[in-house]
Image (tube, rainbow, N blue to C red):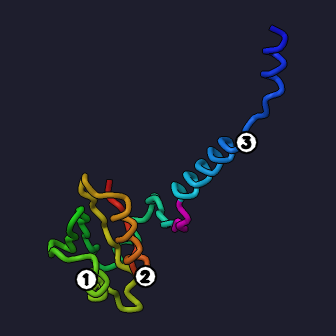
Amino acid sequence: MALRLAKRRSRRLSMTSLIDVIFLLLLFFMLSSTFSRYGSVDLMAAEAGQAAAATTQQRPVFLKIGLDQLSLNGDVLALADLASRLTSFAPEQDSGGVQVLLNLEPDVTSQRLVDVLAVLRRHAAFSVTVLG
């Protein structure tokens, strides 16, 4: 019996399987991670007293965001056409900004909302309010 214990203790461990497992874990984590940079979107909450300032501005623009289409004041358009259509609502320099009211359909993804907000952010004259 003592000979069997001595033989088991003198047996060397193979590191090949451990290296294979570490390599597979490294490969898995490298392939499953993302290296994209995330952007941020500034959203401001409504405050008390903004109704008085809104009376001096132009009429608000109503933008309904769906999963497949956008509706600007009732007219259906694509996301690519949104920037060109918003220029017609741009105010003169003395009249103040234009308020854009966003209405989201239930199936809208957050990426779709971020895409629309990125187009709206290019125009400094627009203040965006997301309706609940």
Q: Position of residue 121 (x, y in %)?
A: 43, 77
Residue 38 on the magenta span = yes
| Residue of label 1 | 81
Q: Residue furthest left?
A: 75
Left or right, 55 with reference to 70: right
Query: Magenta region's main secondary structure?
Result: loop
Q: Which mark is residue 15?
A: 3
Tell me, yes or no, whether the two marked residues, 3 and 1, touch with CB atoms within 8 Å. no
Element carrying mark 2: loop
Q: Position of residue 24 (x, y in %)?
A: 58, 49
Q: Residue at x 82, y 23 (%)?
A: 9
Q: Indicate which disc, 2 or 1, sits on the residue closer to the N terminus.
A: 1
| Residue of label 2 | 122
Residue 104: image quadrant is bottom left
Depth order, front residue of 85/92: 85
For discs 2 and 1, the disc positioned in front in the rendered view: 1
Q: Amino acid at mark 2?
A: Arg
Q: CA distance from mark 2 to mark 1?
A: 14 Å
Q: Amino acid at mark 1?
A: Asp
Q: Residue at x 37, y 70 (%)?
A: 115
Q: Indicate which disc, 3 or 2, sits on the residue closer to the N terminus.
A: 3
Depth order, front residue of 99/24: 24
Q: Is residue 47 above or below residue 90?
A: above
Element carrying mark 1: helix
Q: Position of residue 92 (x, y in %)?
A: 36, 91
Left or right, 105 with reference to 35: left
Magenta range is 34-39
Left or right, 37 with reference to 121: right
| Number of marks present in the image shown | 3
